[in-house]
């Protein structure tokens, strides 16, 4: 009887182990069958180093490490990030904070979840021959250019600060007006148009930095926050989607850190992802974007309440929505209506 009892125990153990192996195998197979969680992020513009953190995160497998399949969708000007997120064709969008505020004022249920750019990248550039060495040299007759579409708020704020009319010349998305002299003081992003003005590579004008004067919005005290990540409140209210968002933020921030550690490599990744500009320009972009993403004052992707408040105040002052109810709503917005840091904190803890 004793031997029979021992055999029974051994048999029972073997059966238990076999059952557990089968169960675990079934569980792993089910997980594999389920596959990664899919999410789409819609950029503000075409593939360029302005968005290098997301492309690097994808190329380095950081999204895959978080069990995510991330679709990075460029903006060709036909569908904006706000439209994509509002219709559900994208779950996350990249836009400027001022633009996001105007959509929230119009009733869209958007919420910012990470502030990627920590400084403004907007400059006003002039040829040295104009004699505009600083903002003090701007007069009522100076032809100041800007693209409009919500990009003009900092320019208007600067002109008003100087006691000048806030009108500006409509500037297209080239630097032709600057080159031909129809614009005295042209708007330029540090990482894009400025590079096309001073450099001599393919597609650039080759003026050289020594022949150009620059007015920086950060130095003038009218800077506004730019590239951020936002979602629909309805989408993120689902616990599963909130978890997906946290994993997306964690991988994206890691991608941005890697990109800033090696801008040249990041530029190459973006260039190979379908860039319409030269590798040389992407490298210039990446080096400049690094300066906007990781200044010393704040951790990458975090919120600086003072800078966010200034962006909100300037948007309230200069945005023109063409709808009285939306304008009234804009004036009532506070920072709590704009962003939450709860997902960022979970992603970086």
Image (cartoon, rainbow, N blue to C red):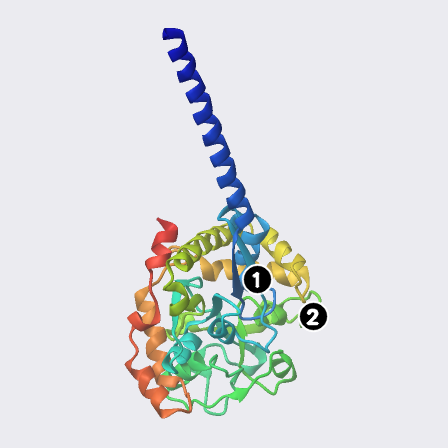
Along the line of sight, the residue nearer the viewer: 234 or 94: 234
Whole-percent x and y of residue 70?
54, 57
- Can residue 35 be spotted in the picture? no
Whole-percent x and y of residue 260?
51, 53
Is residue 283 toward the left or the right of residue 324 in the image? right
Whole-percent x and y of residue 95?
47, 71
Q: Which numbered tag is attached to residue 72?
A: 1
Q: Quadrant of residue 278?
A: bottom right
Q: Sequence order check: which comes first, mark 1 or mark 2?
A: 1
Instruction: Residue at the far right: name it.
Output: 202
Q: Secondary structure at mark 1?
A: strand
Q: Secondary structure at mark 2?
A: loop
**124 shown above or below 90:** below
Is residue 209 toward the left or the right of residue 291 in the image? right
Q: Which numbered tag is attached to residue 323?
A: none
Along the line of sight, the residue nearer the viewer: 331 or 220: 331
**251 shown above or below 50:** above
**273 shown above or below 83:** above
Q: Residues within 10 Å of mark 1 (few under 14, many from 20)?
A: some
Query: How many badges with numbers are in the image?
Result: 2
Along the line of sight, the residue nearer the viewer: 213 or 340: 340
Disc 1 versus disc 2: nearer the observer: 1
Instruction: Residue at the far front: name it.
Output: 1
**Which quadrant of the rendered structure holds the N terminus?**
top left
- Proximity of marks 1 and 2: CB atoms separated by less than 8 Å: no
Distance (Cα) linking label 1 and label 2: 26 Å
Q: Residue at x 51, y 61 (%)?
A: 289
Q: Quadrant of residue 303?
A: bottom left
Whole-percent x and y of residue 56?
56, 53
Q: Residue at x 55, y 66 (%)?
A: 191
Q: Which residue is mark 2?
A: 203
Q: Residue at x 48, y 65 (%)?
A: 91
């Amino acid at each position: 009887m004793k031997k029979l009892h021992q055999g029974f125990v051994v048999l029972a153990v073997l059966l238990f182990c076999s059952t557990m192996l089968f169960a675990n195998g079934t569980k792993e197979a089910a997980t594999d069958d389920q596959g990664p969680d899919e999410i789409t992020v819609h950029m503000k513009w075409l593939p360029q180093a302005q968005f290098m953190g997301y492309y690097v995160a994808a190329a380095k497998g950081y999204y895959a490490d978080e069990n995510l399949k991330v679709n990075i969708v460029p903006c060709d000007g036909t569908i904006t990030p706000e439209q994509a997120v509002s219709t559900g064709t994208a779950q996350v969008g990249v836009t400027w904070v001022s633009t996001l505020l105007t959509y929230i004022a119009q009733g869209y249920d958007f919420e910012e979840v990470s502030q990627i750019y920590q400084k403004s990248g907007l400059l006003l550039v002039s040829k040295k021959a104009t004699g505009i060495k600083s903002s003090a040299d701007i007069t009522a007759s100076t032809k100041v250019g800007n693209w409009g579409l919500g990009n003009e708020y900092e320019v208007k704020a600067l002109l008003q600060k100087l006691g000048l009319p806030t009108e500006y010349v409509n500037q297209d998305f080239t630097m032709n007006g600057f080159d031909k002299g129809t614009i005295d003081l042209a708007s330029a992003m540090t990482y894009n148009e400025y590079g096309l003005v001073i450099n001599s590579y393919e597609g650039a004008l080759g003026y050289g930095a020594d022949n150009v004067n620059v007015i920086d919005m950060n130095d003038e005290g009218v800077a506004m926050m730019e590239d951020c990540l936002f979602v629909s409140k309805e989408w993120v209210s689902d616990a599963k989607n909130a978890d997906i968002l946290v994993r997306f933020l964690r991988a994206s921030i890691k991608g941005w850190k890697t990109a800033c550690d090696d801008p040249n490599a990041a530029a190459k990744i973006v260039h190979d992802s379908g860039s319409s500009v030269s590798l040389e320009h992407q490298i210039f972009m990446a080096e400049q974007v690094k300066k906007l993403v990781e200044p010393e004052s704040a951790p990458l992707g975090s919120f600086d309440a003072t800078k966010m408040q200034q962006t909100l105040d300037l948007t309230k002052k200069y945005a023109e929505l063409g709808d009285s109810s939306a304008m009234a709503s804009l004036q009532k917005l506070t920072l709590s209506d704009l962003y939450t840091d709860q997902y960022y904190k979970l992603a970086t803890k």
